Image (spheres, helix red, strand yellow):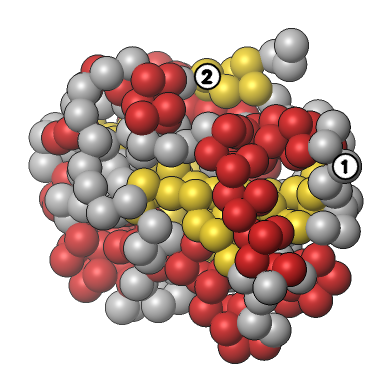
């Protein structure tokens, strides 16, 4: 079994490492530092840490001001609160002036589990995708999360980085280097391309193993960078495999699947199946139970692959 590591813990420790190297890095939180793991930075650099309380809109405004003053602010809270609760402040104070603010949200998707519907961010990628000029990253594991955070710190401009609550299996090793706007090909295949993001990348790999035993060759891509987006990888996958399945822990509207479908329709139309949360909100249960009920498992990806291959034959 691969080692499991929490992305948010890796993020918190990466902040400390970067803070030692760059005195311009500052960190903001909204009364959730023990959950977002920014408390590691707060302990080591108390004068560069700002707990804004339960006031996410104010936190975004402060982060914007710090960026305008030459600092590199990392602002963190749960994904349901940012960009959800503070959408207008992000739009007006960060996106429009394109300030150098890094928004890193944890507890995204339905894997917050028992916290229930009020804390399940399943619309956040659609909101973030609507901001012109934003960089959007959904890491597949803790190693990629750290790489993305370090890249964001070294790159001018606004970022939205989406992390999750539970521990997740490591896909990469320390040799990995995140590249914005580039899909990572994890497995080659010729019959269908599975394009996944976040926690669904592991499920895509599991599905590809199941399908391999039936003679179905799956190309598996980790599309962690949603903006900028690797259109060429999608076009190549459509051309070479003739069928695509996308997988994400998000509503099917406005996230990965929507973007892939738009690109496919523009350049090389092929059958596409989207594995995502349908037009509904979830409920309170254990993360694994929710992933199964709302169709976000390797089995659901496997079924989607079989459907899309049948469509390809028509």
Check disc 2: other Cα within 10 Å, few if <14, some if 14-19, many if 20+: some
The residue that appears at 27% across and 18% down in the rendered structure is 285
Check disc 1: other Cα within 10 Å, few if <14, some if 14-19, many if 20+: few
Q: Position of residue 154 (x, y in %)?
A: 62, 55
Residue 122 can be seen, yes or no: yes
Position above or below: 39 against 68: above
- Residue topped by disc 1: 215
Q: In this view of the protein, which residue sits in the foreground, 274 or 113?
A: 274
The residue that appears at 54% across and 39% down in the rendered structure is 300
Question: Helix, strand or loop at disc 2?
Answer: strand
Q: In this view of the protein, which residue sits in the foreground, 281 or 167?
A: 281
Q: In this view of the protein, which residue sits in the foreground, 197 or 277?
A: 277
| Mark 2 vs mark 1, CA separation in Å | 32 Å
Question: Which of labels 2 and 1 is toward the front?
Answer: 1
Along the horizontal axis of the image, is 126 left or right of 215? left
The label on residue 167 is 2
Position above or below: 190 against 98: above
Position above or below: 28 against 125: above
Q: Along the polypeptide, which appears first: circle 2 or circle 1?
A: 2
Identify the image quadrant of residue 41: top left
Identify the image quadrant of residue 192: bottom right
């Amino acid at each position: 079994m691969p080692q499991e590591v929490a992305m948010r813990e890796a993020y918190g420790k990466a902040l400390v490492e970067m803070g030692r190297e760059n005195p311009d890095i500052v960190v903001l939180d909204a009364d959730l530092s023990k959950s977002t793991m920014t408390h590691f930075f707060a302990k080591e650099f108390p004068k560069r840490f700002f707990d804004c309380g339960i006031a996410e809109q104010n936190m975004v405004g402060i982060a914007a001001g710090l960026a305008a003053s030459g600092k590199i602010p990392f602002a963190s809270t749960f994904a349901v609160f940012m960009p959800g609760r503070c959408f207008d402040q992000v739009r007006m104070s960060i996106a429009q002036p394109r300030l150098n603010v890094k928004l890193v949200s944890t507890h995204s998707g339905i894997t917050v589990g028992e916290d229930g519907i009020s804390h399940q961010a399943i619309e956040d990628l659609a909101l973030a995708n609507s901001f012109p000029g934003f960089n959007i990253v959904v890491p597949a594991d803790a190693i990629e999360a750290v790489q993305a955070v370090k890249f964001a710190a070294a790159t001018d401009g606004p970022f939205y980085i989406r992390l999750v609550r539970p521990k997740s299996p490591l896909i990469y090793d320390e040799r990995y280097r995140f590249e914005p706007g580039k899909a990572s090909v994890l497995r080659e295949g010729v019959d269908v391309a599975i394009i996944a993001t976040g926690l669904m990348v592991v499920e895509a790999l599991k599905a590809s193993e199941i399908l391999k035993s039936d003679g179905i060759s799956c190309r598996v891509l980790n599309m962690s960078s949603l903006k900028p987006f690797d259109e060429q990888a999608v076009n190549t996958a459509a051309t070479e495999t003739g069928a695509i399945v996308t997988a994400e822990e998000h509503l099917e509207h406005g996230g990965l699947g929507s973007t892939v479908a738009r690109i496919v329709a523009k350049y090389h139309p092929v059958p596409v199946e989207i594995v995502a949360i349908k037009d509904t909100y979830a409920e309170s249960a254990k993360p694994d139970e929710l992933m199964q009920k709302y169709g976000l498992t390797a089995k659901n990806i496997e079924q989607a692959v079989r459907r899309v291959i049948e469509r390809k034959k028509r």
